[in-house]
Image: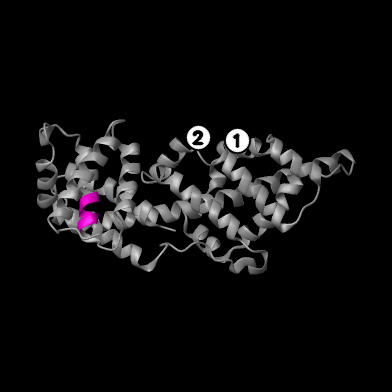
Amino acid sequence: MINRALIRLKVVQLVYAYYQNEGKTTEVALKELDFSLQKAYDLYRSLLLLLVELRRLAERKENARIAKNKRLGGAGTASSDKVFAENKFLLQLEANTALGEFAEKQKKSWAEEDVFLKKIYDAFFNEELFHHYIDKGEYNYESDREIIRKLYKTFIVNNPDFDALLEEQSLYWNDDKEIVDSFVLKTIKRFDEANGADQELLPAYAADEDQEFAGRLFTNTLERAAEVRRLISDNTKNWEFSRLAFMDVIIMQIALAEILTFKSIPLSVSFNEYLDIAKIYSTPRSSGYIHGMLDNIVKKLKADGVILK
């Protein structure tokens, strides 16, 4: 699940923090990087548990409706809460062995966020898409899974109500949610009814070598700092190096460390990844400026035979 896009984002955050906190050792910073990446995986599983808790809320609402009808002496009619509570995909997700093991170790659960939970639930139920699904009345595993995927994409992805809530739970989570949401949607799509409770979630790392990539990128960024910053300084043209935005320097430093260290990564990949990060963390003009700087530096390194890709 933790892919290189997320790793690069985390390395930018942690390298910036490293230089802002004097006295921190590389060893301590590496442990913080590993912890930060693990927290992203925790967020992924927590967002899956949010869907489980929404199903449980539907079940509680349906049970309360049944109890009320019994007191009033009527049978009542089937409700939307019942349909949601009996969603086949959500029942499989709730029974998932790996997710259950994770839930048991957590100190907090979504059930404690009652107001927030009901707000999401009400949004689901007021969605025309869900009403159409109810009215159609054709419920099977595939349709149950697809309606949850669409509701998640509509009301949980890019939902500003998560910002303060996630910040309370972990300082790491706000910046991770956009990427992690894409993994949750991918997971929903991958679920297969035949796998039952043993359905595999996405692994912590997308590939075995990615964990090593994270550590090497971080350490090489720091170890080659003088060399890389000299390259940046020599190519600032009419600008004084000291006038560059600090975040721009950090982004270029990491990008060049990656380009110089990882020979197999295409230049276009490194360029695009760090330009996307610049759009998030730096000034509006930074992306274009960084692109021009990196392009000039790489052309000179190619001409000198330092870069062969």
Q: Is residue 296 above or below residue 209?
A: above
CA gap between label 1 and label 2 equals: 10 Å
Q: Is residue 89 above or below residue 82?
A: below
**Dot 2 corresponds to which residue?**
161
Q: Are marks 1 and 2 in contact (CB under 8 Å)?
A: yes
The image quadrant of residue 34 is bottom left
Query: Residue 131 location, x and y as percent?
Result: 74, 38
Which residue is at a point 62% across and 66% down the rendered structure image?
197
Q: In the rendered structure, find residue 119 and report the number of the disc placed on it.
A: 1
Q: Which one is earlier in the sequence, the residue at label 1 or at label 2?
A: 1
Q: Residue furthest front?
A: 303
Scheme of colours in the image: one colour
Which residue is at a point 40% across and 40% down the rendered structure image?
167
Q: Residues within 10 Å of mark 2 (few under 14, many from 20)?
A: few
State which region is magenta.
Answer: 255-260
- As helix, strand or loop, the secondary structure at mark 2 comes to loop
The kind of secondary structure the magenta stretch mainly shows is helix
- In the depicted view, which residue is nearer to us: 296 or 51? 296
The image quadrant of residue 70 is top right
Quarter holding the C terminus is: bottom left
